[in-house]
Image (spheres, rainbow, N blue to C red):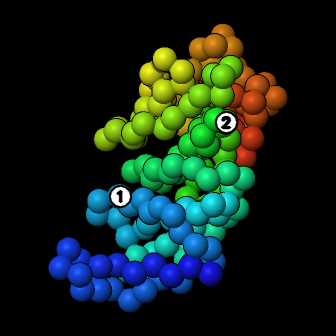
């Protein structure tokens, strides 16, 4: 069990503590949002900062840098493995959006105002838009037409209902 205390620059406690089901190592927030994403050695949790309650929690298989996106997704970079996309309602892993290079190098760099993820893999820097509609459009371009149910599951989402709208 872990406890989070929120302090101001003057050292005084700003709000009641938050009890988490694990010891947190990092917290990520979005300006103007009441939700915070906490991560630990093998767990992540979404917390409503107004009620101070854990909204949802999940296990992850490695410590990782995290980012919340304005469109309701979370990005979890797994050092040496890849970058995964998670939905935040419910907290659910949707799939891999970037793989590590052959030497196992990958680093989550930042998330910009458009909700795109910037990462480096070896000596390359890449940007991925985190917008399911952009993914569907790109998958349709690559397929040259309507996606089959298998292509949809592989390239768009295994959890999103099949919709061959190309």
Residue with the most extreme bottom position: 16
Q: Please give the name of the residue rendered at 45% of the width and 22% of the height, measured from the top-left corner.
A: 125
| Residue at screen point 76% across, 25% down | 151
Q: Is residue 33 left or right of residue 161?
A: left
Residue 75, horizontal then vertical, whole percent: 53, 46
> In the rendered image, is residue 78 in sight?
yes
Instruction: Tell me the residue that label 2 is attached to.
Output: 81
Q: Quadrant of the C terminus?
A: top right
- Is 124 left or right of 41, judged from the image as shown? left
Q: Nearer the viewer, mark 2 or mark 1?
A: 2
Which residue is found at the position 66% from the left and 28% from the top? Answer: 104
Task: Name the residue nearer the viewer: 134 or 96.
Answer: 96
Which residue sits furthest top? Answer: 144
Element assignment for label 2: loop
* Residue drawn at 54 percent across, 24 percent down: 121
Q: Which residue is mark 1?
A: 30
Helix, strand or loop at mark 1:
loop
Q: Residues within 10 Å of mark 2 (few under 14, many from 20)?
A: some
The percent position of residue 68, horizontal first and vertical second, equals 45, 53
Reply above or below: 154 against 69. above
90, above or below 98, in the image? below
In the figure, residue 142 lies in which quadrant?
A: top right
> CA gap, disc 2 to disc 1?
25 Å
**Mark seen at residue 77:** none
Q: Where is residue 162, by image quadrant?
A: top right
What is the quadrant of the N terminus in the image? bottom right
The percent coordinates of residue 14 (x first, y second) are: 28, 84
User: In terms of depth relative to the viewer, which is nearer, 122 or 56?
Assistant: 122
Q: Quadrant of residue 136?
A: top right
- Position of 49 with respect to 107 (left or right) is left
């Amino acid at each position: 069990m872990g406890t989070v205390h929120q302090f101001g620059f003057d050292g005084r406690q700003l709000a009641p503590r938050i009890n988490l089901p694990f010891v947190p190592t990092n917290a990520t927030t979005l300006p103007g949002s009441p939700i915070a994403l906490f991560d630990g050695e093998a767990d992540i949790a979404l917390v409503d900062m107004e009620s101070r309650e854990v909204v949802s929690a999940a296990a992850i298989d490695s410590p990782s840098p995290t980012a919340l996106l304005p469109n309701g997704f979370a990005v979890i970079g797994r050092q040496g493995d890849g970058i995964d996309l998670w939905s935040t309602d419910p907290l659910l892993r949707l799939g891999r959006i970037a793989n590590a290079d052959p030497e196992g190098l990958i680093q989550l760099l930042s998330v910009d105002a458009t909700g795109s993820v910037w990462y480096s893999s070896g000596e390359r820097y890449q940007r991925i838009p985190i917008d399911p509609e952009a993914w569907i459009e790109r998958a349709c371009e690559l397929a040259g037409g309507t996606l089959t149910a298998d292509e949809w599951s592989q390239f768009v989402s295994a959890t999103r209902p099949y919709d061959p709208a190309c």
